[in-house]
Image (spheres, rainbow, N blue to C red):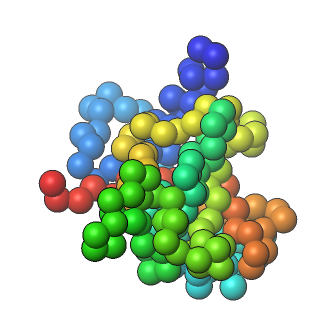
Amino acid sequence: MMKMKNRLIPAAVCLLVSCQEKQAPAAEHAPAAPSGEAKAIRAARATVRPGEEITLAGRIMGNAKPFVEGRAVFILGDPDVLTPCNERPGDNCETPWDVCCDTAEDKKAGTATIQIAGADGKILRESPEGVGGLEKLAGVTVTGKVAEGSSADLLVVNTRAIRVERGAD
């Protein structure tokens, strides 16, 4: 387990950039920042093809467990399509990131699966939850390549850069 954690931390450090995080003065390599104009997930699903570079913006939501246990994978939801339950008047849902009030069709159209791979190209075997601000309902922008097998029905992105958006507290 410690070996996996040791592999995730360097990968996460290389990938995660935050608007408010301080840069380490001794850092030899600047973390990759998402590049290009961010697309909405719903629009991207209809137009992107496997192997294409893409930048997506959204929030970590769309499932009761948006982080995949034991894998560096999470679900990114399109806030133009999906609404967390805590943003619905009178809804006191304990898991607002599951967007349980949205339809199955909206969840399908409004989500993308984001994967973080190591230098060997294999998906890391540790959840990124809590690393660099990655948490349920966090605003996130990612840049990466659309994975082989992706289609309008299932968008999977192998990310090379992640930025967690920090809101004013």
Residue name at image x 61 percent, y 32 percent = 126
**Residue 161 horizontal/vertical position (percent):** 52, 53
Left or right of 130 in this view: 103: right
**Residue 80 horizontal/vertical position (percent):** 44, 80
Foreground pick, 95 / 156 = 95
Left or right of 8 in this view: 167: left
Kindly tell me whether residue 122 is visible in this rendering: yes
Q: Quadrant of residue 8?
A: top right
Residue name at image x 64 percent, y 59 percent = 113
**Residue 98 horizontal/vertical position (percent):** 51, 59
Left or right of 153 in this view: 1: left
Relative to residue 123, is residue 55 depicted above or below? below
Considering every residue shown, the one lying at the far left of the view is: 169
**Residue 52 horizontal/vertical position (percent):** 71, 71
Q: Quadrant of residue 44?
A: bottom right
Foreground pick, 7 / 154 = 154
Q: Quadrant of the C terminus?
A: bottom left
